[in-house]
Image (tube, helix red, strand yellow):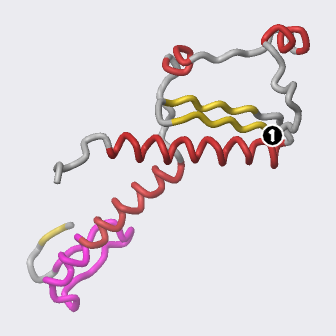
Amino acid sequence: MGGPDLKRNSRVKFVRRSHTLKVKAHELAKFCDADVYLIINHKRGSFVYSSVDDKLWPPSDEKLEQKHPGIDRWSFNKMESLPERSESHLSRLTRYFAARSEHLRSLENLYGKMDLANIVADKEGLKIVSLKHDHVF
């Protein structure tokens, strides 16, 4: 028994992310009618995906430049220099509902300890007044 595998997380992350890239490359080709060529070269192995059944595709860099002058090329450094992606709408919504749920739980705990017959809401419904304890919440 050798103990915990310290590199397991790294391997799992690589497998998951490379699988996601493969699926996304295929979806881009299938649903967006794009020609996609993906190469993943890693010490654990290499993978090539081509959405075009042609051994001459993708073309060489020279042919790409001829066919698409001013092609937009992205390097690792260019991607690294991009600002962090903002939080997704789903993440913000999830955080919002978690905060609201926590707030409701705290109100349930508070009201569970009070006699509801002695609780009155003000006109706007913004404050809850306990007639028994003279507290404003």
Q: Secondary structure at mark 1?
A: loop
Q: Quadrant of residue 26?
A: top right
In percent of width and height, residue 103 lies at: 29, 65
User: What segment is highlighted magenta in the picture?
Assistant: 106-130
Quick check: is 107 in the magenta stretch? yes
Q: What residue lies at 52% left-to-right and 53% top-to-bottom?
A: 90
Quick check: is 62 in the magenta stretch? no
Vertical side of 128 occupied by 38: above or below: above
Vertical side of 121 occupied by 118: above or below: below
Residue in the foreground of this view, choosing between 53 and 107: 53
- Is 57 displayed left or right of 26 in the figure? right
Q: Which residue is mark 1?
A: 51
- Is 118 displayed left or right of 57 in the figure? left
Quarter occupied by the N terminus: bottom left
In percent of width and height, residue 29 lies at: 80, 42
Q: What residue lies at 83% left-to-right and 37% top-to-bottom?
A: 34
Name the kind of residue labelled 1 in the image: Ser
Vertical side of 137 occupied by 120: above or below: below
Residue in the foreground of this view, choosing between 46 and 18: 46
- Is 85 displayed left or right of 6 in the figure? right
Quarter occupied by the C terminus: bottom left
Q: What residue lies at 52% left-to-right and 14% top-to-bottom?
A: 77
Furthest-front residue in view? 1
